[in-house]
Image (cartoon, rainbow, N blue to C red):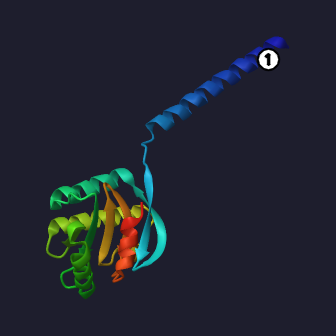
Amino acid sequence: MKLKYKYLLVTLLVVVAIASIIILKTILETPIVTTGEVTLYMGSKPLYAINIDENICRDLIKDIRDSYGIGSRQAIIMFGLTTCPHCKIQDKLFTEYYRSIYKPLWIDVDSKAYNIFYKLVDLELKGGARPADVTGVPHTVVISEYKIKAIIVGRVDDKKFWDDILREP
């Protein structure tokens, strides 16, 4: 009887060891994706939070910073169309109050801006945004360093709203 229990115990230990190796191997081979929660606004109204892949986000913001010479720690990046009246009004507000940290990217006349915009939208969709919520313009991202602080789709004329977004950590 004791010999039977020894074989059972050894078999159980082997099964546990094999299962542990498989689990550990799976964990080590799984790429680490860190996400940051970012609030998506429709105009000045918060819609919901989306999870942005921080590695892809860092590369995208680096591309924007390098391509357009944006050196400030914080920046307001507006994607728009030159034919969009809301984009023009938003551009005027940003130019008047936030000139030193503002960069408009006109996606209908700048192919680099167009490509970056669609990478951004893809990132937002993969983070859980609904297509109808992120494909419009003006489409503004507020960045700090290499992170997105907020995504605002639509025109917001309220300077206090922008001051609050810029002030948030």
**Is residue 20 positioned above or below 87 on the image?**
above
Secondary element at image label 1: helix
Looking at this view, is 135 or 59 the one in front? 59
- Dividing the picture into quarters, in which one does residue 135 lie? bottom left
Q: Amino acid at mark 1?
A: Tyr
Q: Position of residue 121 (x, y in %)?
A: 33, 67
Q: Position of residue 128 (x, y in %)?
A: 45, 65
Report the quarter where the C terminus lies: bottom left
Report the quarter where the N terminus lies: top right
The residue beneath circle 1 is 5
Looking at this view, is 19 or 71 the one in front? 71
- Residue drawn at (70%, 24%), measured in percent from left and top? 12
- The residue sitting at the right extreme is 1
- The residue sitting at the bottom extreme is 85
Q: Is residue 126 visible?
A: yes
Q: Position of residue 81 (x, y in %)?
A: 21, 79
Looking at this view, is 22 or 150 the one in front? 150
- Residue drawn at (22%, 56%), measured in percent from left and top? 63
- Dividing the picture into quarters, in which one does residue 53 lie? bottom left
- Residue drawn at (45%, 64%), measured in percent from left and top? 50
Left or right, residue 47 beside residue 120:
right
- The residue sitting at the top extreme is 3
Left or right, residue 29 beside residue 79:
right
- Dividing the picture into quarters, in which one does residue 132 lie? bottom left
Badge 1: residue crowd in 10 Å (few <14, some 14–19, many ≥20): few
Q: Position of residue 91 (x, y in %)?
A: 23, 79
**Is residue 32 positioned above or below 25 on the image?**
below
- Count up the numbered dots: 1
Q: Is residue 150 visible?
A: no
